[in-house]
Image (spheres, rainbow, N blue to C red):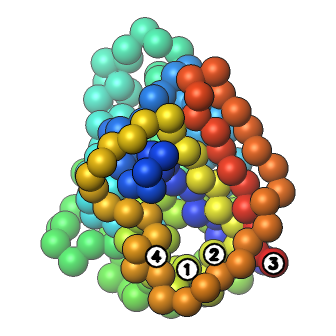
Amino acid sequence: MRKIIAAINMTLDGFCDHTAGVVDAKLHQHYSELIDNAGVILYGRKTYQLMQFWQTLLKNPSGEKSMDDFAVSIDKIQKLVFSNTLKDTGWNSANLTQRPLNEEILELKQQSGKDILVGSRSLIIQLLNSNLIDEFQICIHPVIEGKGLRLFDEVKDRVVFKLVKTKTFTSGAIILYYERT
């Protein structure tokens, strides 16, 4: 059975914002490897639209290897987008899904293949509240943002995870790996 891995960035003060982090080449490399070893990534509309930035680097590479490699990785992976407003993804490897999140996840988990990544706060909260997250990979950036969306403010019930690994970057970012107990 495939695992559902919630992978997200967070500031020291608990806000999740893909634009607030301290990103370096090693972090891009880490996320490229994570994506290369997954079968599909799930996004909500807002995060998906932020990720579309990487399409520009496919057409006009930045010359920075880690960023260009990440653009290739994110382009290759199948993306499922949950949106009530988008009519088209504009990306060959991305598809809109009209099915409810839990229904889609339960079917994906039963299929053979690589793990399922979830990269949107809204989807992570819904899956966490449905007890469907198997693993968290939370990248904490050494930034106090002071505003934004808190990662866990809409969680309904207490959920216990076990820290299984950490990974530290020279930028000061750290990834905490948690598995469900």
Residue type, numbered disc 2: Ile
Along the line of sight, the residue nearer the viewer: 6 or 140: 140
Q: Pointer 4: residues within 10 angstroms few (<14), some, or many (20+)?
A: many
Vertical order, 7 against 171 (above or below): below
Other residues around mark 1 within 10 Å, as few (<14) / some (14–19) / many (≥20): many
Residue visible at 78% across and 60% down in the picture: 163
Do the residues under discs 1 and 2 have CB atoms within 8 angstroms?
Answer: yes
Quadrant containing the C terminus is bottom right
The amino acid on which the numbered mark 3 sits, given as a three-letter code, is Thr
Question: Could you tell me the amino acid type at mark 1?
Answer: Leu
Badge 2 marks a residue whose secondary structure is loop
Dots 1 and 4: beta carbons under 8 Å?
yes
Position of the N terminus, as image quadrant, is bottom right
Q: Which residue is mark 4?
A: 125
Residue density around tag 3, few if under 14, some if 14–19, many if 20 or more, within 10 Å: few
Compared across the picture, whether 126 is left or right of 5 comes to left
| CA separation in Å, label 4 and label 2 | 9 Å
- Mark 1 residue element: helix
Residue in view at x 30 percent, y 48 percent: 146
At horizontal 47% and vertical 81% (from top left) the residue drawn is 155
Q: Which image quarter: residue 25? A: top right
Residue tagged by mark 2? 133
